[in-house]
Image: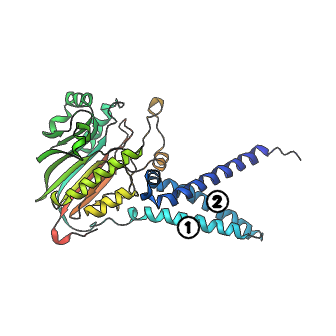
Amino acid sequence: MFSIFWPVKLAIGLFKFFLGFLVFLTCVYTVMALMGDKGWLWSLTTHFRVQYLIVQSIALVLTGVGLWNKHRNYQPIGRMAKLNVLVLALFVGINGWAILPYYLPAPNAHQPSQGHVRLMHCNLFGLLNQHTDYVIDTIKDNQPDIRDLVEYTSTWQEKLEQSGILKAYPYHLLAGHGHIGLYSKIPLRNTRLVFTSPSRKVSNHANLLATFSLGESPVTLLVAHPASPVRPSHLEWLKQSFGVWEQERPNLGENLVIVGDLNTSPWSVEFNQLIKRTGLRDSQLGFGLQPSWPMWIPLPDDRRMPTWVARSLTIPIDHVLVSPRIKVLARHTGPFVGSDHLPVIIDLAMLAKSKAITP
């Protein structure tokens, strides 16, 4: 019999099919993510834990509601339906467990500290981003003591110099046009460029190293922008960069901060190995996940996606890693600055040695 509600039924059927397909894919990718060290493709699946969790949680809730309605109406519930709920709950638990540590209390949260410095990191998306005013306003609003700019072109440097915003930052180090600029209000010592291998001694493959004082203690700052793992060779380059930092860790001092667009998420094998082998910790711990990429170019009339939509689609690849004696007072992502990345603003202090907690 013909029903006037067939468009509704069709829409519901298509939604169920689409959601089921997404759930299947996210479950497959979750399993692949657990084997992220098997190769390039497996490594790529490690970055989207939040997205997997969102899809699987929606499916679990909808399935659970359906079974509850059947139970209330005394309808039989088959074994496959129960198994479906158990499998969904398992995958929600796997991805939720990977995300949970970021919402637990921050390490050293209640320990006394001394000194204070505010860092701001920003990938400018230099060649395509024309919103110099957005970046200048963000710098003025947050007043960072030290800031690094990635994908920093000669055009951007000229515009910022013309604006006068650089006058407050007399200490600086540049890694050639089109790569990284480091600017500071406080003195920087031992500034130098370092390279991940002799074959990559060009400006846009350099890391910046500098030392500054936090309280009464020296801190080594490493600013980096390793390759995006869009192909297997780039993943190897990223691994090579991380490997150099791991090997050089004993030579970089007790107190170390690594900041930059590291082009990897907190769940990748490479990131976790870096954390383990250097003794650093992710500054997001205790402050919740703060995704920073990709922020799409805004719609006409400066309209943008709602924040909750953007956050559900983006991943955290802009990082600040700190050693155990460095306390994170505050951390947040900044506003849209015309780039495909959000800036990261972080306040740091130094713990007394007797108060430090090893992660």
Residue 102 at x, y = what percent? 38, 61
Location of residue 180 (image quadrant): top left
List the residue tagged with mark 2. Answer: 62
| Residue sitting at x 26%, y 46% | 224
Comparing labels 2 and 1, the label whose residue is closer to the camera:
1
Inspect this view and state whether residue 288 appears.
no
Q: Please name the amino acid that badge 1 sits on.
A: Leu
Q: Is 18 left or right of 48, judged from the image as shown?
A: right
| Mark 2 burial class by Cα count in 10 Å: few <14, some 14-19, many 20+ | few
In this rendered view, identify the residue nearer to me: 315 or 144. 315
Considering every residue shown, the one lying at the far right of the view is 1
**For the C terminus, which image quadrant?**
bottom left
| Residue sitting at x 23%, y 31% | 157
Residue 110 at x, y = what percent? 26, 68
In this rendered view, identify the residue nearer to me: 154 or 352. 154
List the residue tagged with mark 1. Answer: 90
| Residue sitting at x 31%, y 46% | 226
Q: Please name the amino acid that badge 2 sits on.
A: Leu
Quick one: SS at disc 2? helix
